[in-house]
Amino acid sequence: MVHYLLGQGAHGLGLFGNASEGYTLSTEERVALMRLIRREAGPRVPLIASSGHTGTDAAVALSKEMEELGADALMILPPYYLKTDGDGLMHYFGEISRAVSIPIMVQDAPLLTQVPLPVPLLARMGRELEHVQLVKVEAPPTAPKTSTLHAAAGDTLTLFGGLNCQFFIEEYQRGARGQMPGSDLTRELVTIWDRLEGNDLTGAWQEFERILPLLRFELQPGMGVSAMKHNLVAEGVIASARVRHPTASLDPVSLAELRFLRERIRAGLKV
């Protein structure tokens, strides 16, 4: 996977997030994978490791361990089992920030966590917490929040898009400086990025429209991880599309729908 993604043009690697079933990994597996991926990637691209936890002390310990194992930055969900208020969130991210020396990306994902992160609070984190330097905006509608947060935080925060790039272009136009999607459409998404960076908005939309049906399919709740694994198996990148319970596997009808979308993209056609 590491060599495939780098060969597809990935500018960095996001580790142990939702699209990679990070929520199913044991601590030992996470450590072993971090060592392996750091070794295989070398210094070519930054590694952003997810290190949030439902407890502050555990999140601090995991974040320190990921840094020691070679992470270049950390992506951190807020605590979501026992929810806390704004002061509690400042304490949680503040404790992690004081314990590490690498950038922290706050993952603003209320569809997953049911924890709202208002723009004023995120902007305050960027001002007051030394290592909180990035936010992955996954709170829909993502494009308006990207605009508002960019205006409020200025240069104190670098913004990324999420939710599998469904509003990639709008977020870019509103100040996002990166995306962190799944692993099965990397070359196509890099092409969109390159066209945006080259001021080719028409070309970016043309490529986006070509892959949008597959992105849309993968955004169905509970179906994305299995779909991405099946696509990677079809490309010969991985050997098995098995997912870990409670992640759901696609049913036969959904697999046929996925195959149709995948083959249209391979043929360079729009659906």
Image: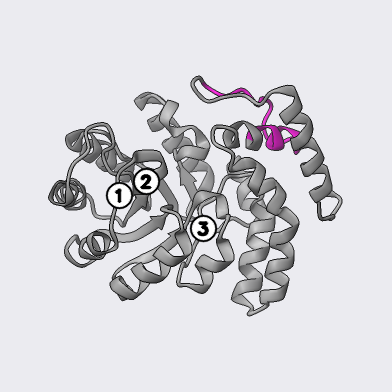
The disc, 1 or 3, on the residue closer to the chain's N-terminal end is 1
Question: Residue 260: x, y in percent?
Answer: 81, 39
Residue 179, labelled with which disc? Answer: 3
> Do the residues under discs 1 and 3 have CB atoms within 8 angstroms?
no
Residue 75's disc number: none
Q: Residues within 10 Å of mark 3 (few under 14, many from 20)?
A: many
Task: Name the residue carrying label 2.
Answer: 110
Q: Are marks 1 and 2 in contact (CB under 8 Å)?
A: yes
Taking the magenta stretch, the answer to whether it contains residue 231 is yes
Mark nearest the camera among 1 and 3 is 1
N-terminal-most mark, 3 or 2:
2
In this view, the residue in front, 149 or 245, is 149
Under mark 2, the amino acid is Pro
Residue 125 picture quarter: bottom left
Residue 35 as seen in the image, left or right of residue 67: right
Q: Secondary structure at mark 3?
A: loop
Q: Name the foreground residue: 264 vs 97.
A: 264
Between the residue at mark 3 and the residue at mark 2, the CA separation in whole angstroms equals 18 Å
Q: Position of 149 compared to 251: left or right?
A: left
Q: Position of residue 219 (x, y in %)?
A: 58, 43
Residues packed near mark 1 inside 10 Å, few (<14), some (14 to 19) or many (20 plus): some
Which color mode does the image show?
A: one colour
Residue 223 appears at what percent x and percent y? 60, 33
- Answer above or below: position of 161 versus 31: below
Of the residues shown, which amino acid type is indicated by label 1? Pro
- Which is more N-terminal, label 2 or label 1? 2
Q: Which residues, given as a range, are shown in magenta?
A: 229-244
